[in-house]
Image (cartoon, rainbow, N blue to C red):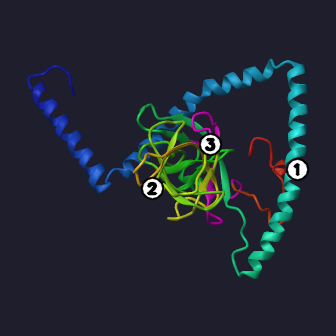
Amino acid sequence: MFVQGPVPGFRLLFVLVLSLVLIVADARFDRLEEVRSRISTFLAPVFWLGNAPDRLGDWFAGLVTPREDLVSENEALKARLMILERRALKYAAVAAENNRLRELMNASGTLDDRVVVAEVVGVSPDPYSHEVIINKGSRDGVSAGQAILDANGLMGQVLYTSAFTSRVLLISDSSHAVPVEVLRNGLRAILLGNGDIGQLELVHVPDTGDIREGDVLVSSGLGGRFPKGYPVAEVSSITKDPGAPFITIHAEPMASLSRSKLVLVVFQEAGAAGAGELYDQQDDGEGGSAGDAEPGEAR
């Protein structure tokens, strides 16, 4: 396009006009969603190749791990497994009691959402856009709007998908908002991202609101976008300005937004993903523990 020729100015003008047409078509009319999906599908091998050195390094490190480290890690895992099994027994009793209460209330018997395990394979290079790419896409049943979790809490939601990958918008992005409630008393508010990966902002809380530092914020389920009850953030600071109608509140996200490698894609409806990829936390009321999963499938 930019090779030397008699009319370089015309070529530059053509490229500028074409760029403007594509920007308007994408921003105003959503005409390029299919093109973006196909390009993401075409670039999927690039993400896999970019992640290959890290996988190779982990594999090589595993070959030369000292025996003492392996024994120590094995003992730690055994201790953690015992703790998790004890918790599973407790949760099984709570789940059974909850099922009985739901039957009395003629409510749904489903206690937990179904999830599929995915791996983070890419990060957006734009410092003003908090997005990551996971290795599950439309062929795995993933669709735009699904909630994404890590082991500690809510990470964000699927922005759009291709056949093999999905782009996830993190809760710390300045364009993201989550309806939450205070776990201690049910006080509802909106948690906004402000572009800081380690800090969120709770808005529209009146100066009379009962909220304290250390309060845990969980998803309220309002709006139907995020499932109810997942940990989102912990209140870190509260500032009350005299005369101001609302409190300035900052919170730290519970999820490890910049460090998590494995995440969970939440399916609120049964059967939304492919067979063999879903893990039902309830296990048909039998109270199965995390230790029943195959190695590498769940953590």
> Left of 94 or right of it: where is 239?
left
Residue range in magenta is 252-277
Q: How crowded is the residue under tag 2: few (<14 C-alpha within 10 Å), some, or many (20+)? A: some
- What secondary structure predominates along the stretch shown in magenta? loop
> Left of 12 or right of it: where is 73?
right
Tell me whether circle 1 and circle 2 mark residues in contact (CB < 8 Å): no
Q: Position of residue 131 (x, y in %)?
A: 48, 40
Q: Is residue 123 visible?
A: yes
Residue on which the image places disc 1:
85
Closer to us: mark 3 or mark 1?
Answer: 3
- How far apart marks 1 and 2 lie (CA) works out to 41 Å
- How far apart marks 3 and 1 lie (CA) works out to 23 Å
Label whose residue precedes the other's in the sequence (1 or 2): 1
Residue on which the image places disc 3:
255
Instruction: Examine the image and state in which quarter residue 281 appears.
Output: bottom right
Label whose residue precedes the other's in the sequence (3 or 2): 2
Closer to us: mark 3 or mark 2?
Answer: 2
> Left of 201 or right of it: where is 26?
left
Secondary structure category for the residue under label 1: helix
Note whether 267 is above or below 122 in the view shown: below
